[in-house]
Amino acid sequence: MEAIPNGIERVDKIIGEVTGILERAEGAAVEKMRTYVEMEPKEGEIYRTLELFADQNFCLVYNSFKVTDEDGKKKLGADYDVESSSETSFISELDEYETKTFDGVEFTDKEAMDFGTRQSEMLYAWLSTCWKAAGGEHSKTPTYFAMDKEYMCHDPLTGEVLEEEDVARKLGYDVVD
């Protein structure tokens, strides 16, 4: 592997490599996502998130959301990590690349912010592309994407970003925070 330059060129180079990795990983990701498209909803499930942990080997976690009754109030409840690939990476080549690339590398605050923002945007766009290719518009359960415990739901079909409770409201469930 050739040396990574300093500064913004370094971020550009890494983003370029990540782009190629995501292109190569698309077929396998689409196949995995087909299983979620075809999956029957869990009992009481109103929507799910597929959460990608970029900071933890790019594992993909399936979270299930339900409406619960707590003291007469409708609340949104979640079963986190219903199913996960925490033992295996959803994007193993990216995990290996970033582990090697970032070993001993010090980013400036500006580089870190630039990389983090660009990587998140790329990953959401890639996940949405894969979801659509997997037939996501026919999913038996509304499905959103999330990243690393951000508690925001990204609609892969529209690009809309909502808080978890707002997704429930959008789906017709009158829940309180």
Image (tube, helix red, strand yellow):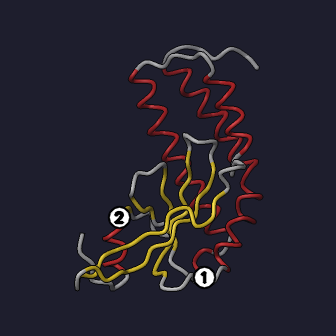
Q: How many marks?
A: 2
Report which quarter residue 46 is drawn in.
Answer: bottom left
Mark 1 or mark 2, earlier in chain: 1
Question: Dot 1, how many residues are within 10 Å of its Cα: few (below 14), some (14-19), or many (20+)?
Answer: few
Give the labeled residue for mark 1.
138
Residue 167's x, y, as percent? 37, 72
Q: Is residue 109 above or below residue 3?
A: below
Give the labeled residue for mark 2.
162
Residue appearing at x 64%, y 38% in the figure? 18
In the displayed structure, does residue 68 sit left or right of residue 57? left
Residue appearing at x 30%, y 76% in the figure? 75
In the displayed structure, does residue 94 sit left or right of residue 47? right
The image's mark for residue 94 is none
Q: Is residue 156 above or below residue 23?
A: below
In the displayed structure, does residue 163 sit left or right of residue 149? left
Residue 13's x, y, as percent? 61, 26
Residue appearing at x 65%, y 72% in the figure? 36
Q: Is residue 98 above or below residue 56?
A: above
Q: Amino acid at mark 2?
A: Leu
Distance from Cα at disc 1 to Cα at disc 2: 21 Å
Quarter holding the C terminus?
bottom left
Element marked by disc 2: strand
Q: Amino acid at mark 1?
A: His
Residue 157's x, y, as percent? 51, 69
Residue appearing at x 75%, y 66% in the figure? 31
In the displayed structure, does residue 149 sit left or right of residue 131? left
Question: Dot 2, how many residues are within 10 Å of its Cα: few (below 14), some (14-19), or many (20+)?
Answer: some
Residue 152's x, y, as percent? 39, 58
Quarter holding the N terminus?
top right
